[in-house]
Amino acid sequence: MSANIEVIPSGDALGAEVRGVDLSKPLDDDTFSVLEAAFNEHSVICVRNQELEPEAYIEYAGRYGEPQNLFLNNYAMPGYPEILYISNIQENGKDIGHADAGCVWHTDMSFNKNPPRATALYAREVPTAEDGTILGDTLFASAVKAYESLPEELKEKLKGKQVVHDVLGRRRARGSGTQDNAKREQVPLMNHPAVRTHPFTGKKALYVVNGECVDIEGMDTDDALELIDELAMTVIREEFIHRHKWQVGDVLLWDNCAVQHLASHDYELHQRRMMWRITIGHTDVYE
Ligand code: SIN
């Protein structure tokens, strides 16, 4: 194990920096178990100042679960279908990456039966304002702390509640939901419990997002939407949020079973942002 490995909590509801590891080299099992324990405890971990080839990045991500392949995705790195470009950079007038990822609060792919365990972002270019202010922060909110904050009677009320997730709802929430009927067959509705038990820590977390969650089984839809809104707004209360200010070389990993995230789109086209994203593993969702 790396003798100098240190885990430094952010002091917020979630998040920690891990120091003393070089991800360009294979991690021995002891070092990885420190990283994984930090990940399970803090939900978001970041290792700074990394210089990684795609292979090393994929190998690191693969320690947490199988990296998903993005064959046929226009924004996948050529030759590396595991890596998705999240970027505002254009070449010949065309986006080379996914330019509007993370525009609304969400947890990745919750409209799938088995959503990913984790997502990794590796910062390659970070936008800054003329005065040097870092732009394009990513915000994370603890759905675990949010659940723990609920009054007991609301926790009781949520028992057994199945929430309907609709990816098209998310697109509508950010104003890009066109041709919904045509796409419905490709992206069927998915039910998940309002509260999920974390598959690694056993902690409970709210699993409800505004926009994407469109109903609750057995409830009147207006009442369901009101409850969804209340729960989703609880997750993103200031006290549950950690804001990550990026530096080039950051390798950050978030836990989709415990957090929601939001990307700040506060930069212009000439302020280049390039992130390499890997979506990792598949989880069972259960109450
Ligand atoms: C994402 O939601 O996948 C991207 C987050 C970010 O770019 O900050």
Image (cartoon, rainbow, N blue to C red):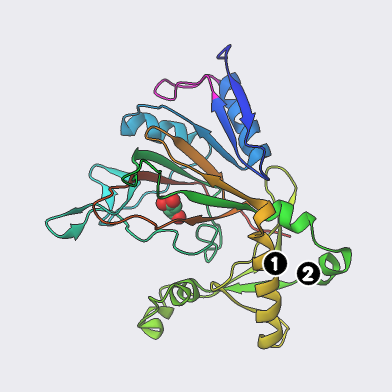
Left/right of residue 38 with respect to residue 188 in the rendered view: right
Res. 44 in view: yes
How busy is the neighbourhood of tag 1: few (under 14 within 10 Å), some, or many (20 plus)? many
Q: Residue at x 62, y 43 (%)?
A: 43
Residue 27 located within the stretch drawn in magenta = yes
Residue 148 located within the stretch drawn in magenta = no
Front residue (pair 225, 77): 225
Which amino acid, mark 1? Ala
Question: Which stretch is magenta?
Answer: 19-28
Res. 193 in view: no
Image location (x, y in percent) of residue 23 = 44, 25
- The numbered disc on residue 271 is none
Q: Residue at x 32, y 58 (%)?
A: 99
Q: Residue furthest right?
A: 153
Q: Which quarter of the figure has residue 50? A: top left
Principal secondary structure, stretch drawn in magenta: loop
- The numbered disc on residue 194 is 1
Which amino acid, mark 2? Leu
Q: How many marks?
A: 2
Looking at the image, is mark 2 or mark 1 earlier in the sequence?
A: 2
Q: The C terminus lies in which quarter of the figure?
A: bottom right
Picture layout, residue 53 above or below residue 189: above
Image location (x, y in percent) of residue 2 = 55, 14
Local SS, label 1: loop
Local SS, label 2: helix
Q: Residue furthest front?
A: 131
The residue indicated by pointer 2 is 158
Left/right of residue 248 with respect to residue 253 in the rendered view: left
Q: Residue at x 48, y 71 (%)?
A: 170
How busy is the neighbourhood of tag 2: few (under 14 within 10 Å), some, or many (20 plus)? some
Q: Are marks 2 and 1 in contact (CB under 8 Å)?
A: yes
